[in-house]
Image: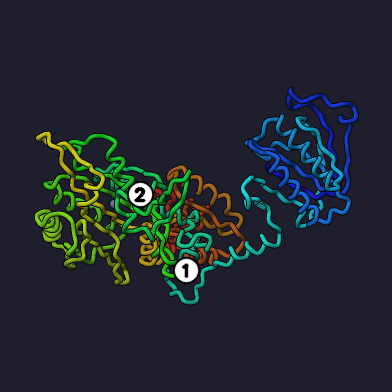
Amino acid sequence: MKILSLHCDYINFKPKKKALKSIDDLDEKEKSEKKIENALAIFLAAEKNDNEEIVNKLVKNIQEIADQVNLDNKKVVLYPYAHLSSNLASPENAVKLLDMTEKQLEDKGFEVVKAPFGYYKQFELKCKGHPLSELSREITSDEGEVEEKEMGEKERGKLLNEIRNSQLDTSKLKENDHRIIGQKMDLFSFNNMAPGMVFWHNNGLTLKKEIVNFWREEHKKAGYEEIETPQILDKKLWQVSGHWEKYKENIFLTEYEDRYFAIKPMNCPGGMLIYKTSPKSYKDLPLRVAELGVVHRQELSGTLGGLFRVIRITQDDAHIFCTEEQLEDEIGKIIELTENIYNKFNLKFDHVELSTRPEKRIGSDEIWDKAEGALENVLKKRKMKYNLNPGDGAFYGPKIDFHVIDSQGRTWQTSTLQLDMAMPERFDIEYTDKDNEKKRPVMLHRTLLGSLERFIGVLIEDTKGNFPAWLSPIQVRVVNHTDRNTDACKNFIEKAKNKIPDLRIDDDFRSSTVNSKIKEAEEIKIPYTIVIGDKEEDNNTIAVRKKGEKPNYGINPEEFLDNLKEEIDERK
Ligand SMILES: [Zn+2]
């Protein structure tokens, strides 16, 4: 049973037309308009399986509400209102329950007016508007499940305040902290309603999407497929993968139809299920499967810090399935792809760390020799600086971690490449080799950017928010010198959009000075600010101010746009 209780100054209603065929016709008196003053109107919808027990509870609820709102005259209007539920009782049962309710209320001294059931009705009411005048409740058969859905205004206000109290405390942060730049540029925010989970604003999401577009293009060129797997997966899967045993305390859990589910902390098990959907042969290998997956990992809230350590992580994951012979080649290709991607962001590898076999491990020494040898060979061939961490590998395979160096000389661990001898075994995945024998592929896990959140944090601090044009949330701002030049500015914007349809261009036509408008554009790191004054209009030119540089006057607008298009398209 669902009810909506409205304490009102008055309620009028008049039946208009029958809504259900099976309902008896009303007589003239019942058809007339009724007006009841100072009443408690109970709008209600009886639901499937509702019974006498529910009616008893309903009456108890109505009594409670009547007491709370000091309903001295004890006038109650029972108003059948089917729209409260999508799981309605049969009309017969609903009528029976309504009658029962009426009788019980009358027995308790209430004066009851019942609006006709099964009719379209016109109604009007004036709600008193005090904090308890609107309440909705769901009345169910389980003890303790009588839920008060509407809370008082006061309580709600208190909760709302708690939600608002999650402002960024900048007092202990350095000026170039990505959280400060992020706020200034309106990129993202955090709220204690979702600890460690980023609220991406339009500007930040624009940046993220541009990175992802680039990432996708590079992966396509490098021969990757892309997949997407579910967010929530049955516990059994995590037991098979081994994450349940090793990683349980970091997993968010949820329940559904008496089954336990994990909100995925990793993408691999879902990917394994896709691998298993079709038989594979040696011709399918190497199989490179990328997934830009969103994973959640529980961390202590005290350890969270801006974008650097989050709970909701967008991970640029990929798994490579290959033969032992292909392994070295594949590792080389991953390193190449990693370098390509980092070069674009002007981040260079500083060094890598190679972690080798721990004491407790699975797999024969022979296979560990091969795996570690493959990793080391590639690093040597590429003359990469690496540190050896003997014994630091996972029990299922050796790994290499990549450290990049930023403009301020700080190093960041970002990419990881991990060989896995366990998971193919646990999921029993195989391929048919040339000799028709079933064999296990070698599996590599790798992330290049790692966590996209963290990578963006690094990028913000590395560039201090001075992104290249292709990444900038706003690429061009057009400023008028005076109101006289507004139309010329609008024309330029139109021309720009025709030439570069995806261009992120905006305007500042406020009446403040040109200098203050330019200063503001510089502060939010817009790469190009265009100024048009009378002189520019007369000569059909623009003044271009590249961020941080002196303005260039007398620029041909077409030429500027051609150059800008090239700069963006080529991600310069
Ligand atoms: Zn993986």
Q: Secondary structure at mark 1?
A: helix
Q: Secondary structure at mark 2?
A: strand
Measure the C-alpha gap from mark 2 to mark 1: 27 Å
Q: Which mark is residue 20?
A: none
Q: Residue furthest bottom?
A: 172
Q: Is residue 339 left or right of residue 228?
A: left
Choose between 168 and 72: the one closer to the eye.
72
- The percent coordinates of residue 14 (x first, y second) are 84, 34
Q: Is residue 517 left or right of residue 386?
A: right
Q: Contact (CB < 8 A) between labels 2 and 1?
A: no
Query: Label 1: how many residues lie within 10 Å, few (<14), some (14-19) or many (20+)?
Result: some
Q: Quadrant of the C terminus?
A: bottom left
Query: Label 2: how many residues lie within 10 Å, few (<14), some (14-19) or many (20+)?
Result: many
Type of colouring: rainbow
Choose between 485 and 175: the one closer to the eye.
175
Q: Identify which amino acid the numbered label 1 is placed on.
A: Ile
Does ligand 1 reach within 8 Å of label 1's beta carbon?
no
Residue 553, can we see it?
no
Q: Residue at x 23, y 60 (%)?
A: 394
Q: Quadrant of the N terminus?
A: top right
- The percent coordinates of residue 138 (x first, y second) are 66, 46
Q: Is residue 12 left or right of residue 362?
A: right
Instruction: Answer with mark 2 or mark 1, whichever residue precedes in sequence.
Output: 1
Choose between 243 and 352: the one closer to the eye.
243
Q: Pointer 2: what residue?
A: 292
Q: Identify which amino acid the numbered label 2 is placed on.
A: Leu
Q: Which mark is residue 180?
A: 1
From what the image shows, is residue 493 above or below residue 174? Answer: above
